[in-house]
Amino acid sequence: MLKIVIPGREMFNEKTQEFFTTKEHTIQLEHSLVSLSKWESKWNEPFMSKKDKTFEQTIDYIKCMTITQNIDDDVYNALTTENIQTINEYIAKPMTATTFGKSDIKKSNETVTSELIYYWMIALNIPMECQRWHLNRLLTLIRVCNIKQNPPKKMSKRELMSRNAALNAARRSQLHTSG
């Protein structure tokens, strides 16, 4: 959970053509599967895509992350650049000590949506209360469960020798050597 302080500011309302002042607010945010699901249900597109978000989409995700009750929309308009940077850093944090080696990383072209993550949770028997965890921590747990339930197949001696022979042949041809 992240607590941020949004300073009070003087702002201009384009519709009423008037200046107004906002008070300082402290809000609590949670980057979780719940907030991701809320955002995707509104925008009808995957949040975890490589496509850049508009400013409006970014502010709306911050609204979806907010767990503090009864926050007026004007408060989000008062977010500073530093507030948004702090929020982005929080979203990017791994929130776990678990790391994966290069052999554990598999590239997938599958589009990850909240429903797919919920499916993974159900398939791996992960309790639903984990949907409120930091999203990166939940995704790490899903990867760990998947690795533990489906450990990589060990190569037989014959497969290992065949693979090494192929690698050596490729290196010899690449370096134009005979041994």
Image: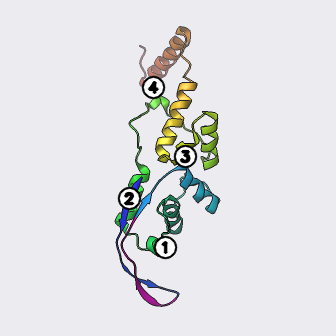
Q: Name the N-terminal-most of marks 4 and 3.
A: 3
Q: Residue 79: percent from the left, percent from the top?
A: 40, 69
- Residue at figure coordinates x 49%, y 86% from the top left: 14
Q: Name the N-terminal-most of marks 3 and 1.
A: 1
Tag 3 secondary structure: helix
Q: How many C-alpha atoms fall within 10 Å of the one at disc 3: few (<14), some, or many (≥20)?
A: many
Q: Amino acid at mark 2?
A: Lys
Q: Which residue is mark 4?
A: 174
Q: Amino acid at mark 4?
A: Gln
Q: Amino acid at mark 3?
A: Gln
Q: Which residue is mark 1?
A: 72
Q: Which residue is mark 2?
A: 3
Q: Amino acid at mark 1?
A: Asp
Tag 4 secondary structure: helix
Q: Which residues are magenta?
A: 16-26
Residue 9 is labelled as none
Looking at the picture, the colour scheme in use is rainbow
